[in-house]
Amino acid sequence: MHKIKLLFLICFLSFFLISCQTVKEKTDAIVEKENKKLSKYIGKTSAELKIDLGNPDENYINAEGNLELIYKTKKYGISCERKFELNSNSKIIGFVSNGCF
């Protein structure tokens, strides 16, 4: 009986570890796809960004004096926030994406 419990425990743990790895791989693929999609805006102007994404939901000047445009959406009840940082020439120099897939 002890061997059966041990075998069951080993099978359960193996399945759990494999499942976690699969979820991690899928999540990494989604993040990579999102980063690739947003990377095309680096070096573009705010006008080009607004053509594709529309007007931002928020904007503000950050500590470095650069403008940040924030786009917020919701998909399946999960909030998505994309921030784009623009330099003084209105060129996009960086972005951050949270909760987007």
Image (spheres, helix red, strand yellow):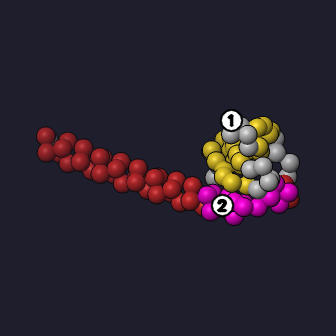
- Residue span colored magenta: 34-48
Q: In the image, what residue type sits under mark 2?
A: Ser
Residue at left 85%, top 57%? 47
Position above or below: 55 against 29: above
The spot of residue 68 in percent (x, y) is 74, 43
- Indicate yes or no whether the magenta region holds residue 56: no
The spot of residue 38 in percent (x, y) is 68, 58
Q: Which numbered disc covers residue 95?
A: none
State which mark lies toward you, 2 or 1.
1
Q: In the image, what residue type sits under mark 1?
A: Ala
The spot of residue 75 in percent (x, y) is 71, 46
Residues under labels 2 and 1: Cα distance?
A: 23 Å
Residue at image mark 2: 39
Q: Earlier in the sequence, mark 2 or mark 1?
A: 2
Direction from residue 13 to residue 42 in the image, left or right: right
Residue at left 62%, top 44%? 98
In the rendered image, is residue 17 in sight?
A: yes
Q: Residue furthest left?
A: 2
The spot of residue 73 in percent (x, y) is 75, 44
Residue at left 20%, top 48%? 7
- The prevailing secondary structure element of the residues shown in magenta is helix
Residue at image mark 1: 63
Q: Split into 4 quadrants, where in the image is the N terminus?
A: top left
Badge 2 vs badge 1, beta-carbon distance below 8 Å: no
